[in-house]
Amino acid sequence: MENKRTFTPEQLHYLRLLAKQYPTVQAAGTEIIRLRALLNLPKGTEHFMSDIHGEHEAFLHILNSASGEVKEKVEELFGNSMSRQDRNDLATLIYYPAAKLALVADEQADLEEWYRLTIHRLVELCRHVSVKYTRRKVRSFMPADYEQIIDELVHLAEEGGARRDQYENIINTTIQIGQAGDVIQAICGVIKALVVDKLHIVGDIFDRGPRADIVMDSLMQTHNVDIQWGNHDVLWMGAASGSRTLVATVLSNSIRYNNLDVIETGYGISLRPLSIFANEVYRDCDTECFKVKLTGTDADQYTEKDKLLSARMYKAITIILFKLEGQKLLRRPEFGMADRLLLDKIDYQQKTITIDEKTYPLLDCDFPTVDPADPYALTEEESHVINQLTDSFVHSEKLQKHVRFLYSKGGLYKICNGNLLFHGCIPMTEDGRLLSFTIGGKERSGREFLDYAEKTARKAYYDKRGSAERQFGLDFLWWLWAGRNSPIFGRDRMTTFERRFLQDERTWTEPKNPYYTYYQDPAVCELLLAEFGLHGPHCHIINGHVPVKVRKGESPIKGGGKLIVIDGGFSKAYQPTSGIAGYTLIFNSRQLRIVSHQPFTGKYNALHKNDDIENESVIFEKLETRMLVSQTDEGAELQTLADDLTLLLEAYRTGAVTENHKS
C-alpha cells in the first residue's frame, strides 16, 4: 500500500498561503503549465547603459532605438521588401511616434492610405518581435484602451479568409473613427517594450548635461529597469535627503558648468537667495578663478554682468562647500581624511598654503567670509543661505519623486544572469587584495562593505529626521561621493580646492584605486566575481564611471573579456577625451554585443532627416546554445514556484490542503 505524503507544519503553512492565490487543482495546474512554457522560451534582451550625465536627447534616442536593436528588427523583416528610405522612416516613427505623426500629417497627401500601410507594417513587426514572449506578456505591454484591438491585430495578421477580412475591418474602422494615430503610438510602444526586456542603468544619471530630470521621467515610464548608483546620483540623493554639504556640491558643480536648467526649470529650485548673497558679500572680491565654463553658443547669450554674477555665486557656494566639508571631516575622523582639511592651512599674509608639508602660492585667497581663527565656521548669512537652499531641495516635489525612484530601483551593485553590475570599483590595495574599511566600527571589505554601504546610504533618506542614524547616513553619502577609495568614486582624493586655487597641475591629480590596474588581469576579475558568488565562463563585470579613452587606443573590454567598461562619454564634456559618445551593451539569448556610439546630432535631425546615431557593434561573446528563460535568475524563481505548485497539487490530492472552488 502506497504511503500517504506527509507535510511539515512549515510546509503546510506556506502551502495554505499559496492556496489563496491558486485555490483549486485546476488553478495550480494551469499555472504550472504556463510556467513551464515560459521556462522554455528564449531569454529576453537586456540593454545596459551608463554615465548618461543629463544628456537627455542622446539618452532618449538610444533608449528608443535600443542601441540599434529596433533598426535591426526592421532590417530583418523588411530588408528585402521596403526601400531604405521607408525602413528609416519606419524606425524613426517607432523612436518618436507622436512627433513623427505630427510631421506626417502635414506631409502626406493621402493620410488614410499612409495610416493603413503603416499599421500593417507595425503589426507585422510587432508579431516578429513577440516570438520570445507568451501572449499574456505581450498583452501586458499594451495600453488598456487599445489592448483588445492590438491583440486582435497581432494574432489575426497571418490568418486568411474571414479572419483576414476581420483584420482589415479593424484597421479600416480605426482609421475612419480617427483613432489611427493613437493606435500607431500604442503599437510603437509595444514594439519597443518587446525589443528590450530589461534595462540596466549602471550609474551617473545626473550632472554635466542639461536635463537629468527628463532622463528620470523617462526611466520611471520604462517597464523593467534597475539602477546601480553612481557617484553623481548619490550626490543628488544626498542633496534631496537634506545634506547641506551635498546641496552646496550640486550647486557648485551646476554653476561651474553653466548647467542650471535642471535645477531651476527641472526641479523648480530658486537660486535667488544665493545670487543676492553673492552680489552683496562678493561684490568687490577677486573672482578670476571662478569663471563659469561657457561652451559653443552659450558664451554669446550672457552679458559681462551675467558672467560676473555667475562667478560670484560660484565662489560663494564653493567657500560654503569647503567649510561644510571641513566640518564633516572634523566630525567623522573614521573617514580617515584629515589631510583634506585645507582652509586652516592657509597663510593669508604670504598668500600660500601648505599641503603634505609642501608650500604653494595661492591664485586667490580673497575669502571675505573665512575667519582664519575658525575657518570652518559658517557666517550667519552663509548659514541662512544654505539652509534656504537645502529646504528648497527637500521640498522639491519632482526631485523627491525621482530620488524615491532611485532608492526603490537602485543599489550599489546588482547580480543579474551571471553578470555583476556596479558603477565604480571594488576597492583594492596596492598588492591586489580587497581593501578593508573600518567605517561603522567594524572592518569590512568587498561585498560585505558594499552591502553595509548601501544599507547606510538608505538611512540618509528613510531614518527619522534629526536622528543620529540619519545624520551619519547623510555624512556617509558625502563619503560615497568624494571619500578616499569610495567604491563609487574610486580615487584617493577629490582635488576641487587645488584645481581652483593652485597653478601647479601636479597637485590636481586624483590617483585611481589600484582596482583600475588590476582589472586588466583575468584572474583578478575571476576573484572579484567569486566574491559575489559568480563562477563560470559566461560571467562578467559590467562597469561604468571612467570613460574609455578610445582616441588613445583603449578598449572597453578588460580582463580577457571578463570585464566590460560601458562609459564611453555620453557627456559632451567628456567626448574630447573619450573620442566617442558612449558605449552600451546588448545581451540577448545568443550573444553579448558592445555598441559604440558617435555624437547625436539632435532630435530635429532625427525626425526630419532620419539621422540615427552612428554606431559600431562588436560581438565579443557568443553563447554555445541559445539561452532560455530557465537558465536566468528569473527562471530560477519561476522554477521554484512551479515546484511549490507541484507540491500544492499533491497536498490537494491527498487532502492535506482543501480546495476552495468559491474563490
Image (tube, rainbow, N blue to C red):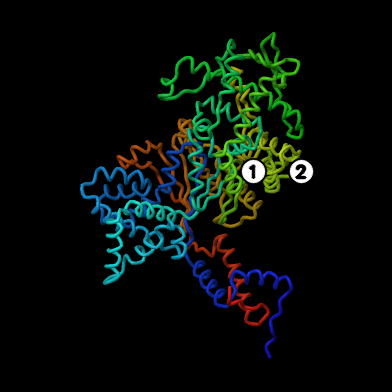
Seen from this angle, which residue lies furthest left?
109
Which is nearer the N-term, disc 1 or disc 2?
Answer: 1
Of residues 409 and 3, the one nearer the viewer is: 409
Q: Which quarter shows the N terminus? A: bottom right
Residue 355 shows in this picture: no
Residue 302 occupies which quadrant of the picture? top left
Res. 426 mark? 1
Q: Which quarter shows the C terminus? A: bottom right
Specify the amino acid type for callout 2: Glu
Residue 28 placed where, x, y %? 57, 74
Res. 257 mark? none
Q: Is residue 228 above or below residue 341?
A: below
Residue 204 placed where, x, y %? 55, 39
Residue 372 placed where, x, y %? 73, 15
Crowdedness near tag 1: few (<14), some (14–19) or many (≥20) residues, C-alpha within 10 Å: many
Q: Identify the residue at image location x=44%, y=37%.
A: 581
What whole-number distance in Å separates the C-alpha atoms at marks 1 and 2? 15 Å
Crowdedness near tag 2: few (<14), some (14–19) or many (≥20) residues, C-alpha within 10 Å: few
Determine whether the residue tagged by mark 2 lies in a helix, strand or loop: loop
Q: Identify the residue at image location x=57%, y=39%.
A: 397
Q: Identify the residue at image location x=53%, y=43%.
A: 565
